Image (spheres, rainbow, N blue to C red):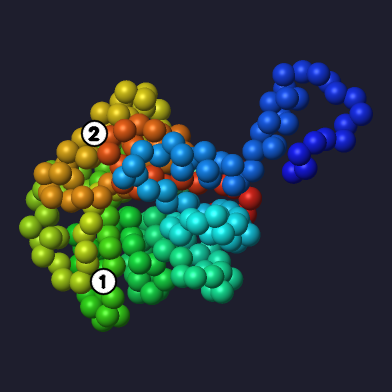
């Protein structure tokens, strides 16, 4: 957006100045502001799902290396279009279907959504065949949420002895999402529980926090906040 405007008449309302302020806020400004507000130890994962290649390229030009996608068919053409850049660090955050494990392992170095023992065993087997060692986050679901998958805390403790011995996958941490409708206090408690569970299992990384709740997640010790709309603005392509 141009810095000034060409309107000859101004409705002189608060709404207009709010609009102008919002329009002037560029991707670069949002990126710098977010980075300035993240505590040390919390990294920014730019969720580029639903956002165009040009925006990814612009952020890469500003120094952002880590990007996340949740659908292979959307990610592949983007990754190809960005192939001229120094390699980016791609994270997979979507629901991982069994038949997509191999191509996901070929395109992504980190998976945030490993949500069952069966899937973890499959990832381990295919990673060995592919000769790669993906970093993975185990997705946990600490509150009822019909729209999400993930290990409950008891399930995770039960399967942990098998999970931790899987060859070929590096389990680096836990990932969680807060259900809609929780208060800020309830989210703080939830993220704190996830951090305590990771500590109990000896896992150093925490993938917690999205546009609507990243401050609480960061305060609870998140090491990766996954930010889409607060960084890129509203979705502009199919995601
Ligand atoms: C798993 C996951 N994490 C993070 C995000 C980013 O969400 P937001 O745009 O609210 O930051 C998404 C977006 O769909 C997502 O699916």
The residue shown at (56%, 59%) is: 61
Beta carbon of the mark 1 residue lies under 8 A of ligand 1:
no
Give how far apart the Cα atoms at labels 1 and 2 are.
29 Å
Per the image, label 2 sits on a secondary structure element best described as helix
Per the image, label 1 sits on a secondary structure element best described as loop
* Marks 1 and 2, the one that precedes in the sequence: 1
**Considering depth in this image, is 132 or 10 the residue closer to the camera?**
10
Observer able to see residue 112: yes
Which numbered disc covers residue 3?
none
Image x and y of residue 138, in percent: 25, 53
| Quadrant housing the N terminus | top right
Q: Which residue is mark 1?
A: 133
Query: On the rendered structure, is 236 left or right of 47?
Result: right
The residue shown at (59%, 71%) is: 81
Q: Which residue is mark 2?
A: 192
| Quadrant housing the C terminus | bottom right
Image x and y of residue 103, in percent: 40, 73
């Amino acid at each position: 957006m141009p810095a000034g405007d060409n309107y000859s008449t101004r409705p002189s309302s608060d709404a207009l100045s709010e609009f102008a302020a919002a329009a002037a806020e560029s991707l670069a400004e949002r990126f710098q502001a977010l980075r300035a507000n993240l505590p040390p130890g919390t990294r920014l994962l730019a969720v580029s799902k639903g956002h165009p290649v040009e925006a990814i390229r612009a952020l890469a030009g500003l120094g952002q290396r880590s990007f996340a996608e949740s659908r292979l068919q959307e990610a592949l053409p983007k990754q190809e279009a960005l192939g001229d850049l120094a390699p980016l660090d791609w994270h997979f955050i979507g629901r991982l279907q069994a038949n997509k494990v191999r191509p996901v392992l070929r395109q992504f170095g980190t998976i945030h959504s490993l949500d069952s023992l069966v899937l973890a065993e499959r990832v381990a087997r295919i990673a060995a065949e592919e000769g790669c060692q993906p970093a993975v986050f185990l997705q946990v679901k600490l509150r009822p949420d019909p729209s999400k998958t993930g290990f409950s805390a008891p399930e995770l403790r039960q399967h942990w002895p098998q999970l931790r011995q899987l060859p070929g996958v590096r389990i680096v941490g836990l990932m969680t999402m807060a259900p809609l409708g929780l208060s800020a206090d309830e989210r703080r408690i939830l993220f704190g529980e996830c951090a305590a569970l990771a500590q109990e299992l000896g896992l150093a990384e925490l993938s917690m926090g999205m546009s609507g709740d990243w401050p609480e997640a960061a305060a609870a010790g998140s090491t990766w906040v996954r930010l889409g709309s607060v960084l890129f603005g509203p979705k502009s392509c199919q995601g």
